Amino acid sequence: MIEALLHRLRENATLAALLGVTPGDSRIHPHSVAFPGPGLAYEYTDMTRGDVYGSQVTFRAVSADFDLTRAIAEKVTASLHVPPTGHGWWFDQTHILTCHLGGGGSLEMEDVGLYQRFVTFDVKWRQ
């Protein structure tokens, strides 16, 4: 499931430009990113199992620029959120059924010049 979400983000040219993607680094990494960014870290937790799986995924946009951090988080939300009447997508053998914004927040560390913005998604999927 996480591969399907990451693929969708890595294919987004606007997000890639915001992150400063290079051929060797997508700037999207598990758990943390290099200081001062920009970058996107992610963590996920499987919540339920069965025919349809449920997971929660949190993406953390990190940058030394507040506006850039906000723009990255907004682009992640626009790329992944499936509206209630929308249809999900397929990647490889994974079908993302729903992906709804479930929460978020921000952390500002002005003394070190670092801003973080969190967006959390509730994802229903099957393989």
Image (tube, helix red, strand yellow):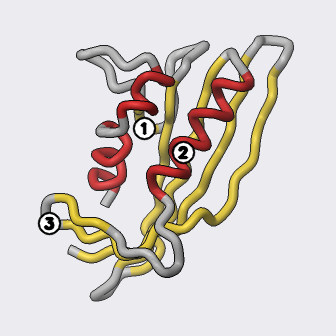
Amino acid under disc 3: Gln
Q: Earlier in the sequence, mark 1 or mark 3?
A: 1
- Residue under the point 45% across and 50% down: 79
- Tell me the quarter of the picture where residue 121 sits: bottom right
Residue 83 spot, x, y in % from top left: 52, 71
- The x, y position of residue 65, in whole percent, is 70, 17
Q: Residue at x 69, y 32 (%)?
A: 116
Extreme residue toward the bottom, this view = 51
On residue 93, the disc is 3
Give me the residue at 59% from left, 56% from top. Answer: 120
Q: Which type of secondary structure does the marked residue at label 2 adopt?
A: strand
Q: Are marks 1 and 3 in contact (CB under 8 Å)?
A: no
Which element carries disc 3, helix, strand or loop? Answer: loop
Circle 2/circle 3 CB separation < 8 Å: no
Name which of mark 2 and mark 3 comes first in the sequence.
Answer: 2
Quarter of the image for the C terminus: give it: bottom left
Q: Is residue 101 above or below residue 64?
A: below
